[in-house]
Structures are given as structure tokens and as C-alpha cells.
Amino acid sequence: MTPADIRAEIIDILDDISPDEDLDNLDDEKNFRDQLELDSMDFLDIVMELRKRHRVQIPEEDYGNLASMNSTVSYLEPKMKDL
Amino acid sequence: MCPAARMPDRRRLSKRGANVTFLSFPVGPAPPRLSPERRPSVAAQPVIAPNLASKLPDDQRIVITGVGLTAPNGNDWYSFRASLLERRSGVQPYEIRYFGKTLAGVCDFDAKKHQAKKEIRRGTRAGSVGVYVANEAIAHSGIDWENIDRSRVGIYVGVTEHGNVETENEIFVIKGFDYDTSCWSHHHNPRTVANNPAGEIALNLGVTGPHYTIGAACAAGNAGLIQGAQMLRLHECDLALAGGTSESIHTFGIFASFNSQNALARHADPAQASRPFDKHRNGIVVAEGGCLYTLERLSDAKARGAEIYGELVGYAMNTDATDFVLPNPERQAECVGLALKRAGLGAEDIDIVSTHATGTMSGDAQECAALRQVFGDCRDVRINNTKSYIGHAMGAAGALELAGNLLSFRDSTVHPTINVDELDPDCQLPGLVLNETAEVPRVDYILNNSFGMLGINSVVIIGRV
């Protein structure tokens, strides 16, 4: 998957997790939590969906990489580039 | 045996329309019929309750001031009542994983009316049902919700079971991952804790008073109501949201289990599948639904000028202690008798008996045997069944079936048990209202039965205020 594919996948997951939010104006630089109403259970949903959809495992110590869209895509790129 | 003989005289006088006074409360002719939209004030309604509850101080008398519900044939109290009077069933074809095609009572309320999409996704169906009916009950009550002390609100939700839906869902999900439990949702625990349906209501409404569910099998709707009343009498809360909810149609297990028990209804016409008392009944139609009441102490209801829809004048719960599933008519009759005794009423005083009968061969006959013991000699009682329209809404059943009858206080009409083409002789009772609505001079007392597995029995008696 390309970085653009990964971003699209994260948007799709966020749309599932936060269906009331408008994701069109998401700022990829900003933390998700500064723009969206996400709590720790929601972040676990991102982890779970990546596991279910792509068998990508994200260890707990790496959760900090899921802070923003840019950091998430950067973190996932090596894990998902061959998918 | 008709225990009515204990306190019959003043009641019989009142039914003849004589103006007699008992405990300073006037007993007179029936009030004029009121359309649901016409809501007179408390003061405009004559208090006509010759029962023991009427001797209590107002802060110990518990009244219904709001009704919120969703049923397979109505998403508010008045449309539900209209469906019953028009004999409109809510049973429809239904399909669920593994079990396949069957029938069910399915609700079509708009969950998004009171919940964000995210709340719906994160929570459970029972939670959504509860949130919907709680909000509807509050709106119906006319309570100034924005200014109420929410630490003084209690939420008491009866449930037959909870957690099966989510557990089945998760097992289905991990099956797709070769049972890798790392794919088991982190939402499973908060969705399946037993207090979930009540807790979701508390979250949605910002209620910080007590909330919990009452696990009472299919007696739970009444049990929720009873719990709410008890907590009000103890001043543990000032407003109780009380009743029951059910999400049971979303678990294949309940269908499969009833089917294995040879107790799941089948019929070519879904609307005729639920047929309590009919000779050719063949089981239960599982339904979802919910009904919560706003309960208040009479003193508080009067103080805010609330409209009052009925008073809880008696209740009882007891246990068969005889079998996992088979009912015990002797214990059921004792439960009815205890509720009457506590209310200070005799069987003759009851105008409507709302039966629990689910459409099983054994259960219906056993309840009728119990009712025969208590009401067998009563001339004026009317006996009906609401499951014949909506199926068995499990934890919500008792609360919903009471709500279905409650407007009889105003319209003096008793909705019938439908689908009784050939009455089972074992279900023969005086006063059965079958297939056609019955007009009655007045309705002062409704007795509502709700029984469940493991031999749990509950009875509430609501009086007209």
C-alpha cells in the first residue's frame, strides 16, 4: 500500500469509529485528539481494525505513533508497504 | 375461590355509580372519556382509590407520570395503544445468523433521535432501546429536565438476559480469524456488563444517581417498576426511570433454545403466530422492545402539577422453587393474592387482568389455572393478553403489556387477545376478552402478571388516579 492508500484506509477506519465527525477537513499535521472526539477506546479501535483488516500488529509501546495522520502513515508505511 | 369477598361492598357500590365516600376520597361515576391529547391536571382527576395505598402519606404513594416505549407495533404510548385497539400485530418474518428464517417482533424506532451514531456504534441494542424509551418517558412526563437534580434520578431497568448478543457477535467475528482472541473487541466488557442497558441511559442523560438492571427473566419489566417504587419510598431518588428492555431478537441462541425446547412459534402468517390461549398455539414469538415509566412520589407529582396516569397500589414477587422452566400455578396464584392483599383489594375489584401467557401449551394453561383460583368467580373482570400482538418482549414484556392497558383508565376499552380461533378448554376463564375489543363502564384497577424462568413471579396492580 502506498502512503495515500494507508491514509485512505485510516480515514475509512475513522469514519467507522467516529461516524458523526466530518473528516473532510482533517489536518494531517494536527493530533487526532485535537480535532476529533476520540478517547482511548477509539484508539484501540484503530489498532483493532488494522489487525483485523490487514493483520498489522501494533505493540502497546508504539501507540504514540498514532497521534496524527502523518505520524500514523509514517509509522505504518513499512508495515503495510507490501500489502 | 374469589378472595374479593374481603373488601367488596364499597367497590360494588362505586361500580353502580353510587356516590359514596371512603377514606374521604370521592367515589363516583366514571369520568368522561378523554382523548390521549387531552391532559387534565392532577386536580381535575377524582381520586377514586379505595385501596391501602391511598391511606399512605403522599410521599409514600407512587404514581406514573410519564411513559416511554418502543414496541413492534408502536414507538410511543398512543400509537401502541392505537395498534392494540386496531388489532395490529407487530410480528414479522425475521432471519438471524445460524438459526435462519423465523418470526420476531421487531422495533423500528429511530435510535438517532436521542443518540449520536457513535453512541449507537459503541453501545448495545438494549442500550439504544433503553436510551430511546428513557428520553421519550422524560419528554412525556413534562418534567423540567434541564433543571432537575440528576443526582436524584434513579434508573431501574429490568432485563431477562444481557450480553448474549455481544458474545455471539464476537465469537462470530473471531471465527473469521481462526478463533484468534486478539481480534476479540475491547468493547465486549462494557457492552456485556449486566448494568449496561441502564448505564447507557445514565451516560446519555447525564444521570448521576443510581443505575442498575434487575435481572428477573421475563418477570423483569414488573420487577423494574417495583424496584423504582421501592427506591422512591426509601427516598433513594426523587424520580425513577423504571421498567424493562429487551434486545433478545439479536441473539440466535434464544431462538435456537426455544426451538430445541419445542417452544418457538411457527405460522404461515406472521401476524397469527403469537396466539396465547388458542388451542393450536405452538410457542413463543421472540420480540424486542422497551418501556420505561417516570415514577414519582405523589407529593412531588402534585407539587409540579404533573399529569398522573396511574398509581402503583400493590405489587408482589415470589418464587416457585419447583422447576427451571415449568411454571407453578399455585405459586403464581399466591403471588397474585399477595399483591391483592397488599393493595387491600379483592379479586372482584380488579377490572383488567393483563396476562403473561406466552403462547406455549403448558405455560398458558398453568397461568389460566392460577387465575382461575383467584378470579374464577369474578363477574366483572376482563382478562387479556398483549403478547398476541407483539410476541414476547422478554425483559420489557411486563412493562410494555402494562402500558398497553394503562390507557384503559381513560378510554374504558379493553383490547382483546387476538388470534384465538379456537379457545383451548384448558385456558377457559370468565372474562376473557377474545378477538374483539370490550367496552366497559370504567376501569379503576389493572393487574399485570409477569412470570419468568427459574420460577420468578411478579404482579403489579395499578389504580386509576
Image (spheres, coloured by chain):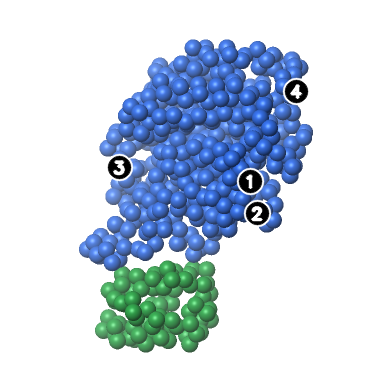
Query: What's the chain of the residue with tag 1?
Result: B
Residue B120 vertical position relative to residue A18 in the rendered view, above or below: above
Query: What's the chain of the residue with tag 3?
Result: B
Residue sitting at the far left: B178
- What is the number of callouts on the image? 4
| Residue position marked by numbered label 3 in the rendering | B256
Please provide percent x and percent y for residue B98. 29, 50
| Residue position marked by numbered label 1 in the rendering | B238
Residue type beneath disc 4: Ser
Hue used for the chain lettered A: green
Please provide percent x and percent y for residue B362. 35, 25
The tag earlier along the polypeptide, 2 or 1, is 2
Residue type beneath disc 1: Asp
Could you say which chain is coloured blue in the image? Answer: B
Q: Residues within 10 Å of mark 1 (few under 14, many from 20)?
A: many
Position of B315 compared to A72: left or right?
Answer: right
The tag earlier along the polypeptide, 3 or 4, is 4
Can residue B162 be seen here?
Answer: yes
Residue type beneath disc 2: Asp
Asked if marks 2 and 3 fall on the same chain, the answer is yes
Position of B441 compared to B285: left or right?
Answer: right
Dot 2 and dot 1 residues touching (CB under 8 Å): yes
Q: Nearer the viewer, mark 1 or mark 3?
A: 1
The tag earlier along the polypeptide, 4 or 1, is 4
| Residue position marked by numbered label 4 in the rendering | B24
Q: Which of B167 and B433 is in front in this view?
A: B167
Q: How far apart are marks 2 and 1 (CA)?
A: 9 Å
